[in-house]
Image (spheres, grey):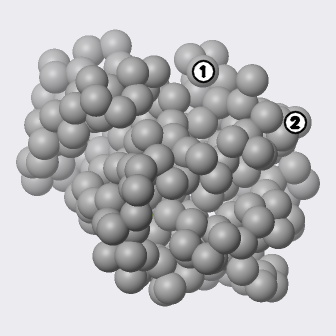
Amino acid sequence: MGKIISIINQKGGVGKTTTAVNLSAYLADKGYKVLLIDTDSQGNATSGLSKKVKFRSDLYEVLLNDEIIENAIVKTDVRKLFLLPASIDLAGAEIEMVSLPRREFLLKEKLQSIKDDYDFILMDCPPSLGLMTLNTLVASEFVLIPIQAEFYALEGLSQLVKTIKSVTRRLNPSLDILGILLTMFDGRTNLSIQVAEEVKRYFGTKLFKTVIPRSIKLSEAPGFGESVLTYAPKSKGAEAYKKLCREVIKRG
Ligand SMILES: Nc1ncnc2c1ncn2[C@@H]1O[C@H](COP(=O)(O)OP(=O)(O)OP(=O)(O)O)[C@@H](O)[C@H]1O
Ligand SMILES: [Mg+2]
């Protein structure tokens, strides 16, 4: 079966990686076998998930040097959670991909041999709508869009929705929006509440009921190469991602 979800927003710093890492960890904790694919050359999901893990290969090698995908996937400290890492090598990948045939389908084709081995495959996208992100959209069944509850949050969203619609029309008719997630929410500020209302008006029931609060533990955890599940399981950030995990399972 294998649900494939990309965590996407071309806006930087909205909580994509934090969501990808922690949602993956909670899905694995629930007993699902999960693969997290880091598709961002910043490699934040890779370093945030495990400092101790050594990897020989990465997504760049899989996409552009014919590395066998199974060989690039590594175990993490979380049981049932696996990682396909990214490194800075991926920064030049888009330029190399442009000239390849079926350039939007490279990732989808690489996933064919392993997608049935996992209950969930999550992809952490880079902050752009370039060819790498397009590859994740083509390979996915769902997108999850984190939106930061801040002033410029809605800027660029119409472009994102347009891109998703265009991919659905031209390249991947089975793509759907799984949900919109409000992140870094601060219920004490009018601004957060206003943004929440605006997002609700725009996306209606696509908005997840779960809202991720601003939580210092969420920002500290990656420094230790851990998800919040092991770093601070009782924190309010952890509680929120646990709740989101339940909602994702219901919707998926
Ligand atoms: N709920 C939260 N509470 C507090 N800090 C958070 C929260 N979510 C994310 N952060 C912090 O905000 C910063 C940006 O988050 P993150 O890296 O997840 O965003 P991103 O969308 O993946 O960024 P990029 O576009 O660069 O890939 C990080 O320092 C992260 O630790
Ligand atoms: Mg990121």
Give the mark nearest the N terminus, 2 or 1: 2
Q: Left or right: where does residue 95 sit relative to residue 191?
A: right
Q: Position of residue 166 (x, y in %)?
A: 22, 32
Instruction: Write down the residue under mark 2.
Output: 31
From this view, report whether residue 21 is shown above or below residue 201. Answer: below
Secondary structure beneath dot 1 equals loop
Q: Residue at left 57%, top 66%?
A: 63
Task: Residue 54: give its label.
Answer: none
Residue 240 image point, x, y percent: 56, 40
Tell me, yes or no, if residue 211 can be seen here: no
Q: Is residue 145 above or below residue 216?
A: above
Q: Which residue is mark 1?
A: 252
Name the residue at 80% across, 53% down: 81
Task: Check disc 1: other Cα within 10 Å, few if <14, some if 14-19, many if 20+.
Answer: some
Q: Which quadrant is the C terminus positioned in?
A: top right
**Residue at image location 65% in from the left, 30% down from the top:** 3
Element carrying mark 2: loop
Mark 2 is on which residue type?
Gly
> In the picture, residue 4 is in which quadrant?
top right
- Ligand 1 within 8 Å, label 2 CB: no
Which amino acid, mark 1? Gly
Q: How many residues crowd mark 2 within 10 Å: few (<14), some (14–19), many (20+)?
A: few
Above or below — where is 218 with respect to 245?
below
Residue 173 in which image quadrant: top left
Distance Cα–Cα, label 2 vs label 1:
15 Å
Residue 16 in the image: x percent, y percent? 43, 55
Q: CB of mark 2 within 8 Å of CB of mark 1? A: no
The N terminus: image quadrant = top right
Residue 72 visible: yes
What residue is rendered at 16% in x and 19% in y? 201
Q: Where residue 250 sits: x, y (%)?
A: 63, 16
Q: Which mark's residue is nearer the viewer, 2 or 1?
A: 1
